[in-house]
Image (cartoon, rainbow, N blue to C red):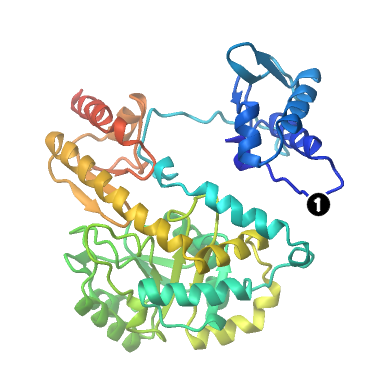
């Protein structure tokens, strides 16, 4: 929706109608709004932005007169067809790749519109934007103190994270934080990780010339004896999901890993992806709560709030925090100060907790529906609750290619015999048809 991205500055000297005109014009010129795309009616936009009807009408008339949009009687306003906007030349002079569109998108690259709280979130962002005194300085290198204090309380209450707000670092995504962590550790280290779990992290490890060991696991998770055998500097783990069973790691195995890591001088990097989003089983306490001085904890708000709000956090043990303090002034903060402050107040006001309860109820029903339909067509179905991911085994080396050709986009791009399907984005109405398409495509020769 256009109204989600138009920011009205009521104290600005620029008239409101001109602010609306310029932002829609820029969206069209940048390609964010495509030709023949319908834009909100005058009544809808003035309601969303809380401005007068005359203000929106004047902005739309300006857009029409300059050829950016057209008013179709009995239909509404649309971006003009054939509008040629000159784009800046790409540095590499290569043609832009056209994005493929899949009718059945199981990639997990977004969230369900029914679980989006964008209207409420927009209010908090606008409120921060209206406080000019907060925006005249750069963000703190480590992240805004207000957000770090809020996250410290939130992470303790929802996941049992034992840390002080001074030990929390904010970043724009988990990969960014892992990059900082590797900067603390230095180059040429060794890391143990389960295969096909976190490719973005693996890329950072390769950038730092780390030796990567793929560690095996059993039905309880990563095996402690394997950790003792490899003796890595870092163990990357997600205790919420086991590739063998699909279940969370039991406390006994967590303690075994902590003891093994202490014995061989290994730091555990806990990727607690969506740890608080359990909706079928009871949420378990994070591994870091059992070994705070042996564990680096990473959490994210992307799937809980909005994927476009790239805010993650990392809780360091004291020994690593002291090393980080020596270099932190060399790392600029990568997350918007506006969004950091908006998130701090959003959490403090209880909005995130309320949204989380709603999301749990919704995804519980959605997961149960999908699993029931999937098991009618496929055997060996494995469910990862926090990841909202289902795995099915197939006997087709071209499985991913065949699915793509039939308008289905799974999570994985490899050619192994496991297909991963994430239901966070696709609508429930598309389940039945999408599963039948998959069955037909995978059974064809």
Callout 1: helix, strand or loop? loop
Whether residue 288 appears in this view of the structure is yes
Q: Is residue 232 above or below residue 427?
A: below
Q: Judge whether 216 appears above or below 87 on screen.
A: below
Question: Is residue 271 positioned above or below 87 on the image?
Answer: below
Q: Residue at x 24, y 58 (%)?
A: 243
Q: Nearer the viewer, residue 331 or 83?
A: 83
Which quarter of the picture shows residue 157? bottom left
- Residue under the image location 29 percent in, 60 percent down: 278
Q: Residues within 10 Å of mark 1 (few under 14, many from 20)?
A: few
Q: Residue beneath label 1, please?
A: 11
Taking the image as shown, residue 89 lies to the left or right of residue 215, namely: right
Percent across and percent down for residue 34 are 62, 25
Whole-percent x and y of residue 1? Answer: 57, 35
Q: Is residue 155 above or below residue 2?
A: below
Say left or right for 241 vs 314.
left
Q: Position of residue 411 (x, y in %)?
A: 36, 43
Q: How many marks?
A: 1
Residue sitting at 37 percent across and 78 percent down? Answer: 288
**Which one is nearer the viewer's eye here, 360 or 308?**
360
């Amino acid at each position: 929706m256009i109204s989600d991205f138009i920011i009205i500055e009521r104290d600005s000297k620029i008239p409101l109608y001109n602010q609306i005109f310029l932002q829609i014009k820029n969206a069209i010129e940048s390609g964010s709004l495509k030709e023949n795309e319908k834009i909100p009616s005058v009544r809808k936009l003035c309601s969303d932005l809380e401005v007068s009807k005359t203000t929106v009408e004047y902005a739309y008339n300006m857009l029409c007169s300059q050829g950016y949009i057209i008013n179709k009687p009995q239909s509404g306003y649309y971006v003009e067809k054939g509008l040629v906007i000159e784009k800046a030349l790409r540095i590499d002079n290569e043609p832009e790749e056209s994005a493929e569109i899949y009718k059945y998108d199981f990639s997990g690259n977004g969230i369900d519109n029914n679980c989006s709280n964008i209207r409420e979130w927009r209010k908090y962002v606008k409120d921060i934007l209206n406080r000019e005194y907060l925006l005249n300085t750069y963000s703190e290198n480590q992240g805004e103190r207000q957000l770090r204090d809020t996250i410290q309380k939130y992470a303790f209450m929802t996941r049992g994270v034992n840390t002080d707000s001074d030990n929390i670092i904010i970043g724009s995504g988990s990969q960014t934080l892992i990059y900082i962590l590797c900067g603390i550790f230095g180059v040429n280290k060794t890391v143990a990780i389960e295969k096909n779990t976190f490719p973005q992290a693996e890329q950072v490890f390769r950038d730092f010339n780390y030796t990567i060991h793929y560690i095996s696991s059993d039905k309880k998770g990563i095996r402690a004896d394997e950790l003792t055998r490899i003796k890595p500097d870092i163990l990357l783990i997600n205790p919420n999901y086991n590739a063998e069973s699909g279940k969370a790691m039991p406390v006994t195995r967590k303690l075994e890993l902590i003891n093994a890591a202490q014995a061989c001088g290994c730091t555990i990097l806990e990727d607690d992806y969506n740890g608080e989003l359990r909706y079928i089983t009871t949420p378990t306490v994070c591994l870091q709560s059992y070994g705070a001085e042996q564990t680096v904890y990473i959490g994210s708000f992307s799937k809980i709030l909005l994927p476009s709000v790239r805010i993650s956090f990392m809780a360091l043990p004291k020994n690593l925090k002291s090393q980080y303090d020596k270099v932190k002034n060399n790392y600029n903060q990568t997350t918007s100060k506006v969004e950091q402050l908006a998130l701090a107040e959003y959490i403090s006001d209880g909005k995130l907790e309320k949204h989380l309860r709603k999301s749990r109820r919704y995804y519980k029903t959605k997961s149960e529906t999908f699993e029931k339909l999937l098991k009618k067509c496929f055997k060996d179905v494995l469910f990862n609750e926090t990841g909202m991911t289902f795995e099915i085994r197939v006997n087709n080396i071209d499985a991913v290619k065949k699915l793509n050709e039939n308008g289905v986009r799974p999570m994985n791009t490899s050619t192994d015999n496991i297909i991963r399907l994430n239901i966070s984005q696709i609508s429930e109405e598309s389940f039945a048809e999408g599963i039948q398409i998959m069955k037909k495509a995978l059974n064809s020769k």
